[in-house]
Amino acid sequence: MRNTFFKEPIIAVAVLLTFFAVFKLLRNPVVYEATLGMISHNYERSGTRENFSIDDVNKPYVSFDKETINHWDAELYKDIRDDFYEVKNPLLKEKPAFYPLFPLVWKLSCIDSRYIVVFNYALFIAGLLILLRLLVPEPPNRLLYCFIATLVPTAVTFYLPYAESLFVLTFAVAVLGIFKNKYWVYFTGAFLFCTTRPAALIFITALLATDLVYFIMQGNAKHFIKEFLSKMLPCVLGYAVVTVVQFLYTGSWTAYFDALAYWPTESGLFNTIIDWSVEGFGMTVFAVFFVCLPALIYLLLWGLKSLGRINKQEKKSVFGEDVAWKKEYLFHLSLAFIAGNLLYTFFTSGNAINGFSRYTMAVPFFYIVLFLVPDRIQKASLLLKSTAFMACLVGMTWFLSFVIYGGDRFRFEYTGLLLFVLLGAFVLFESYLPAKLKWPLLIVLAVPCIVWQTYLFNMFLSNAWIFT
């Protein structure tokens, strides 16, 4: 038992060490030119903040230090860490668009920017292991899915000085409270979760939508109100605390929404689809066709079926004793968040899909679905799984043939998309593979996955077009 208990952390640490070993090797010009440099390029930024250019260059990876790590959102989180929401730098007026828990934890930890990468990865792994041990009962499967979870291309986000790692950990604590029937643990996790990222607003909407479907099925208004309010209370309080804190510094009760105006946007569903980078676009396309649209379709079918499954005598609660029902509820709630994120982006982004893959797959809900989906599809036939996979693949291919953005699809920048498809196929069909073949296949797949993560990490350090 003890050996099993320590194997998942060992896998996580092994991935971390391999990541940094590969990154260090690719900083060497000789190694880079003989390997990754033969099939790809890197980016280099020049000029001023207002007048700059980003060019493709055939250079090895850049250095990893406290200057290169503080780019993009990391710069804003660092500024909140240092000055909270007081605006000393007029170029960082959009700070209220970022929630305060992560920069506060960063400040209290006194961790140097160079080491926040390891700290963030540790937070992510802590949350991941909590979810794994609650949702995946069999130790062999836990090991397998722990490895997969660290290899997905968007997992590179958890190396950055961003709030995503804390977002995963705080929600994992809330889930722990649910499974241990300790409301105060759930309350603490949910409260902190809703002070970490604005995506908590989508979560609150998903929570309401999920509970409404169960209300239709159970038909008990008193039970619905009690259950919903007990789950919603820490979320509302967390959101209220952030609003008050931002008001004290900005004088505005709508500071978060005011800050959104600093991002240039275009309205219109028929705008040309754009992204911050081709790398990010490729991973976003996978997120849309293999994660979000299936989630939305599944939820619509589930909602329709619920109309014929009304049982007014049934009173299920996430704070009860039925573990199987808790998993079912979390599965539907996670799908609701993922689908809600798709709908929110569709109606508000003006087809600027920047960062969509991060907002969809670097969140605890993606990992909850990842860990629960093998059991959910266990009884599905091979034909059904193959048909669903091919439908996603055909839909994605049609979309890529229709959209102008991204140019030639057979280029290195789409490696993340290809790796996601391969990992998705592995998850969907791994139950048909011989036990002795699963790990060798996954280890072979791990090599390009880790290299791709280092490529994205270097892209971030280079202050190039962001991939998230």
Image (tube, rainbow, N blue to C red):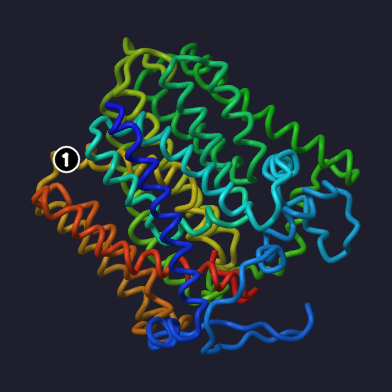
Task: Characterize the local packing of mark 1: few (<14), some (14-19) or many (20 or more) Cα atoms within 10 angstroms.
Answer: few
Query: Residue 202's x, y, as percent?
Result: 56, 43
Q: How many marks?
A: 1
* 237 horizontally vs 24: left or right: right
Q: Residue at x 76, y 61 (%)?
A: 261
Q: Residue at x 49, y 59 (%)?
A: 156
Q: Which is nearer the eye, 443 or 249?
A: 443
Rendered image quadrant of residue 232: top right
Depicted 156 relative to depicted 174: above or below = below
Q: Identify residue type, mark 1.
A: Gln
Query: Residue 124's x, y, as percent?
Result: 50, 44
Q: Which is nearer the eye, 399 or 330?
A: 330
Residue at numbered disc 1: 378
Rendered image quadrant of residue 369: top left
Q: Residue at x 75, y 48 (%)?
A: 256
Q: Which is nearer the eye, 147 or 377?
A: 147
Query: Residue 268's x, y, as percent?
Result: 59, 69
